[in-house]
Image (spheres, rainbow, N blue to C red):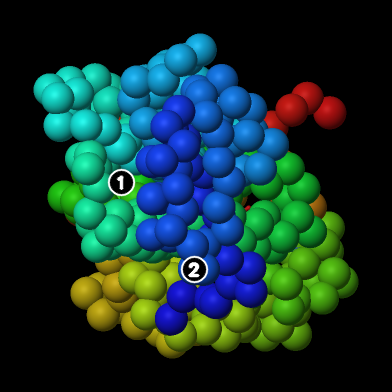
Amino acid sequence: MLPQRVDKPSILLVDDEPANLRILSEVLDGEYRLLVARDGATAVKLARAQLPDLILMDVVMPVMDGYTACQQIKTNDETSHIPVIFVSANSEVGDESKGFDVGAVDYIGKPISPAIVRARVKTHLSLVRVEELQRTRLQIVQRLGRAAEYRDNETGLHVLRMSHYAHLLALAAGWSEHAADELLHASPMHDIGKIGIPDRVLLKPTPLNEDDWRIMHKHPWIGAQIIGEHTSSMLRMAREVAFTHHERWDGQGYPRGLSQDGIPECGRIVAIADVFDALTSERPYKDAWPNEVALEYLQANAGRRFEPRLIELFLGLTERVFEIQQRWSEPEK
Ligand code: C2E
Ligand code: SIN
Ligand code: SIN
Ligand code: FE
Ligand code: FE
């Protein structure tokens, strides 16, 4: 279910012919908040000032034509997300491709048919909603990942690096671009459950004792609870990653002691990405290890902690892994 908005969506109508503006206004009146402009330059200004949800734009106009106005709207960061639909006479439609080149999403021919205008407007507004929803969901998810990270790793760079390692490894393991992107977005939340771990354990500068471990071993389960159950495949993956990233190939991991193919592949991938970055980073309880030592550790644990096939793939990716590490290296203290 999409959230309901209390305010009406706003549409900017741009045409130099008052008669055309009147027709469009009659067609769309009631359901939308309408703004009007008589030329391209005014349209660009109004778009910036009012941030309408959609723009219906005539092509041939004095002062500034529709193509130029559309181009300016699309190259401005604040307005580039607003869909522009060109409304133009059939004789002008010969140059449809020019409209798409400057960033328009659609064309409506003149003379306009009220049913077509209403239908296209509705379609493009609902697409905007879906994109907005995905964008805000992704932002919240990334901020949650950073919140978890903030206590034992203040810069938030760990989640950036490890999620890119996981993305690389997923692609090497044969995942589609789409699935690997979902893992890229999902894996920053792997340690969200550390929110439920007290500072005296999480920030302890010395090795954990048995009681501490009992608490620490809860973080995958707490993470899964925090993320919850969802229909979005990205959030389902996030939950699975949080729950399974400390399972081991040999069944000696936690919280459930799953082994081999019983561990979801996303969890097996993130286990490697997470440990490689944890080893090569400073933590409250440890110094950073050199890359070679960390890679030796991974290799020595193939078939124990980690899936041998994935370790082999990871060891073949080190050049790109080091690039990611460089790109998001911790600032000098
Ligand atoms: P983390 O710091 O994000 O580390 C993730 C995983 O990387 C660890 O999972 C472990 O598999 C690996 N790792 C990190 N540092 C080392 C290390 O120095 N040596 C080795 N061999 N492996 C390392 P693990 O062990 O299940 O730990 C989960 C979380 O528990 C860690 O997340 C960290 O927050 C905490 N933790 C682990 N050991 C200690 C410790 O000695 N002192 C404190 N205060 N916290 C610890
Ligand atoms: C997103 O990336 O924000 C959405 C992905 C999804 O719905 O699965
Ligand atoms: C333990 O289970 O107490 C050891 C921690 C670990 O290496 O996962
Ligand atoms: Fe963890
Ligand atoms: Fe981690």
Residue 118 in the image: x percent, y percent? 32, 61
Seen in the image, is 273 located left or right of residue 250? right
Quadrant into which the N terminus falls: bottom left
Residue 215 in the image: x percent, y percent? 70, 83
Residue 58 in the image: x percent, y percent? 37, 31
Q: Residue under circle 1?
A: 169
Residue 296's disc number: none
Is residue 177 or residue 31 the one in the foreground?
31
Is residue 151 or residue 94 the one in the foreground?
94
Seen in the image, is 227 located left or right of residue 332? left
Amino acid type, callout 1: Leu
Quadrant into which the C terminus falls: top right
Is residue 273 or residue 297 the one in the foreground?
273
Q: Residue under circle 2?
A: 31
Amino acid type, callout 2: Glu
Seen in the image, is 306 located left or right of residue 202? left
Residue 95 in the image: x percent, y percent? 17, 21
